[in-house]
Amino acid sequence: MINILLIVFTISLIYLAMANRMLTYIRIIAFQGALLFGVAFIELIEISLPNLVFVLLETIIIKAVAIPLFIKYIIDRNHITREAEPYVSNFFSVVIVTVIILGSFFLANAITGTHVRKIFFIVALSSLFTGLYIIITRRKILTHVMGFLIIENGVFVLSLAVGSEMPMLVNIGILLDIFVSVILLGIFADKIGDVFEEQDVEQLRNLKD
Amino acid sequence: MIGIFLIGSLLISLAYFFSKNHLLNVVLAFAFCLLHGALAIDVYIHRDITQLVYFTPDALAVILVCVNSIICIPVFYHSFVYFSKHPYKPHEMGLFFGAMVLLTASISAAYLSNHMGILWIFVELTTLSASALIYHRRNKLTLEGTWKYIFICSISITLVFIGILFVTLAIQHKGITDLFYTTLSENATLLSPFWLKLSFLFIFTGFTAKAGLVPMYTAGIDAKDKAPYPAGAILASVLMNVGFVGIFRFYEITSHTEIFAWTNNILLISAILSVFVAAVYMLRVKNIKRMMAYSGVEHMGIIMLGIAAGGIGYYAAILHLILHSFAKPALFFQFGQIYRTYGSKSVYDVGHYFKYNITGALVLLFAFFIVTAMPPSGMFVSEFLVFKSLFASGYLWVLILTMILLTVIIWAFGKNVFKMLFIKPVDFDESNVTRIPFSESLSQYILLALVVYLGLNPPEQLVSLIHSAISTLPK
């Protein structure tokens, strides 16, 4: 079951690469949150109850509902256009993300000594690199934040792999998640929308030497 | 005591957020400096005794906490000077001071933590409080600086977290379930080299954002430029030490394993690139504050060279770290006076500084000699020892390259500083220049004198502390 959820998660990354509209991005992020809820539930069922409840609430409420709604709110409030405006074509993005997934697959297979179940490692790595790729190739500042959320999801998957023995690490990861989303999105909603008329990274090019 | 310190600083910080009274602000600043001083004395006396499970004041932490408690006194003084010249609303002042207290406290707590996760949490807290300081002026450019700082620091902190997860993967196999640095050090040889390498890469890359090394140094430069100068002084000195501590503690773990030579190479590459980047940017940068920030990148590079070379280099690196944390705030405080005189950050608009503020100009001149490590600067001693260790460990070409780059840096730095001191500014209206009293430069003189004193004639206690900080590393 975990395998199915994680594979669906990976497929959602490919879908992300070909998505064109901001709304699709939001839906994918919400969907990933729901998937992570499932993975966390199966994987962490043995840890103590308060901890489990905390992790599950975080994934289902914050990752799957609150953050997507918040991004939606930001888009409406700042009149951000619907297009994601990538620098490269969608076809090329799909190829790159596929290469990333294949690359992490081979990397994970090349590692001798199986400390970790491979599928967690593959999914985490591909999610990490896809997030970075999204950050590099999209023009809107808000898509950068979304790329960062994808990275966060990857890190969460990786922390689940060790989570049943060290629940503290999962909690720290969640702390990071909440902290960063609140700060980044908070600043975005509150300030950037008011100060900059267009939410392009082109606007953030004044600090230089 | 650490518990009292953490709770006390939290309370002081909260009190600042609600404070609207100038007198109360001063009293709170005094209280915090006293509290921090008390912490420094306490950790010095109770060295190596674990408090609250997660905090152990080892020698390195003791040194850096003491440095931090010395730096925070002039920082608060200059913050009050800053606010007396640039009036802000009371709640903005309160936010600034509250964030400052939170930042200083979390920096000290990060030095003291003996557990990877706890160190990580406090580093995260420094990002949060530092961004409030950077955004203090609330305009378009500070917003850009803050956004970049938060974004890059968040990615870096995520990288550190991935590194920690990899360590966990490595140790789980061996049946260890905690992440205390001492436990990891003891069991380092058991751990799988592959995972250790991977986690070193991630943790090192992550902490370079705070330490100001290649590859993630960029965010720090913008932050030091856009933050008000007292905050810039913190960001450019004690906050960089946090990144160093994060790297150094993990370096200590790897030093007992077979990947030690490999980690040294990584440090060496990053260090040379840092010095190189600093040299390139120093040549073209015209913004005084950014120039100072790039000088910090150069010094962190030299420190990492010392660590990578080993031998006497360890001692030199720690000494250099301490001296740099005293010298750089002096420059930043001095920048505040330059800005008040000329109203500009650009080298082009500043000139003939001796005519308008002779004590301040002397500070700038001395600070230039100190920071570029010319005798009698204490940094000359530490830099010389770093070079000696590079020579001794056979990195001759690295040494030659570094010396060439340092010459370039000294030339570029000197060109700008002497332009500011002696050459007439263009179109400068000197009718409304205000005289700056000597008393405001006093703290800079003291800091610079400390650099000379600690470098040329380090007290017995400091030497033994440094030696015990590096005692676990191979000779």
Image (cartoon, helix red, strand yellow):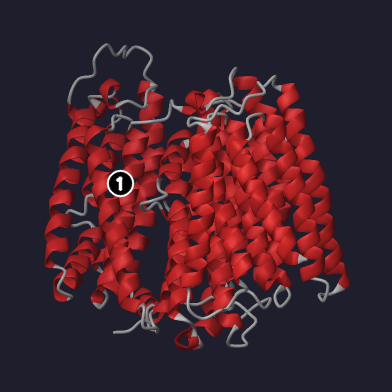
In the image: residue B237, left or right of residue A164: left
Q: Position of residue B261 (x, y in %)?
A: 30, 76
Q: Chain of mark 1?
A: B
Give the total number of marks visible in the rendering: 1
Residue at 47% over, 40% down: B223
Q: Nearer the viewer, residue B275 or B292?
A: B275
- Identify residue for label 1: B295
Q: Is residue A202 above or below residue B412?
A: above
Q: Is residue B106 above or below residue A75?
A: below
Q: Is residue A46 above or below residue B396?
A: below
Q: Nearer the viewer, residue B419 or A49?
A: A49
Residue B135 appears in the rendering: yes
Residue at 24% over, 65% down: B382
In the image: residue B385, left or right of residue B460: left
How many neighbours does mark 1 have within 10 angstroms: few (below 14), some (14-19), or many (20 or more)?
many
Amino acid beneath label 1: Ser
Quadrant assignment for the N terminus of chain B: bottom right
Q: Nearer the viewer, residue B183 or B125?
A: B183
Q: Nearer the viewer, residue B298 or B80?
A: B298
Kindly state the secondary structure of the residue where label 1 is placed: helix
In the image: residue A31, left or right of residue B322: right
Q: Position of residue B415 (x, y in %)?
A: 17, 34
Quadrant assignment for the C terminus of chain B: bottom left
Residue B118 appears in the rendering: no
